[in-house]
Image (cartoon, rainbow, N blue to C red):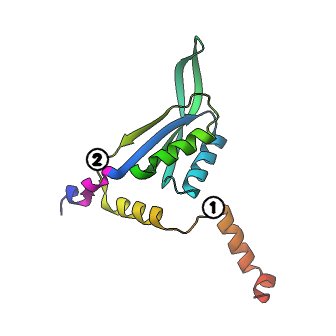
Amino acid sequence: MNIIDKFTKASEDIVFVYTICGNIEEARSMGYSAIREKHAISMDYWNINSIYPWQGVIQEINQFMLMFSTKKRLSDNLIKHIESEHSYKIPMIVTANIDMSNVPYSLWMNDVLNNEEGYITESEQEAIKIRESDEGFNKLK
């Protein structure tokens, strides 16, 4: 099997939605809420330096770039979600269509986004483990 056989052109329904924000708290908040509400499968973020004009003055600031991975059918809802949570008066929100992706990723994305079960955070999972390992808790079962 050659490398191309491991990719699928049926991935045209995958899109990346990009935005920027001013701090890590806002970036993380948008990522968690978009994934929790199943508008996206994942969100990557990284620190960037930006230069742009604002109100007649060229600005140079640190920001965070956010890249959401989602399905084309969910992208409108994701964009509305980002707009509702964004602190910028005029946020940059753009999409990029994906021509191909590896088959396992496409299958995983479909499975997770079509699953109706909710998600918990790692800290919530840890709290559950601690609570379940507590002898007193187990005696009450």
Q: Quadrant of the C terminus?
A: bottom right
Q: Quadrant of the N terminus?
A: bottom left
Q: Identify the mark at residue 20; answer none if there is no mark.
A: none
- SS of the residue under disc 1: loop
Which residue is found at the position 60% from the left and 46% from the top?
30
Q: Identify the mark at residue 121; answer none if there is no mark.
A: 1
Residue 33 locus on image (x, y percent): 60, 52
Indicate which disc, 1 or 2, sits on the residue closer to the N terminus.
2
Q: Is residue 66 magenta?
A: no
- SS of the residue under disc 2: loop
94 lies left or right of 87: left
Q: Is residue 117 above or below residue 93?
A: below
97 lies left or right of 81: left
Q: Which residues fall within the magenta stretch?
A: 6-12
Residue 9 locus on image (x, y percent): 25, 53
Identify the amino acid type marked 2. Asp
Distance, label 1 to label 2, CA atoms, is 31 Å
32 lies left or right of 11: right
Name, please, the residue furthest toward the right: 136
Which residue is found at the position 62% from the left and 64% from the top?
120
Dividing the picture into quadrants, the one containing residue 26 is top right
- Callout 2 crowding tier (Cα within 10 Å): few <14, some 14–19, many ≥20: few
Q: Is residue 47 above or below residue 70?
A: above
Dividing the picture into quadrants, the one containing residue 35 is bottom right
Q: Is residue 11 magenta?
A: yes
Residue 53 locus on image (x, y percent): 54, 16
Identify the amino acid type marked 1. Thr
Q: Main secondary structure of the magenta part?
A: helix
Q: Is residue 33 above or below residue 62?
A: below
Residue 105 locus on image (x, y percent): 37, 59
Which residue is found at the position 79% from the left and 89% from the top?
139
Q: Identify the mark at residue 99; answer none if there is no mark.
A: 2
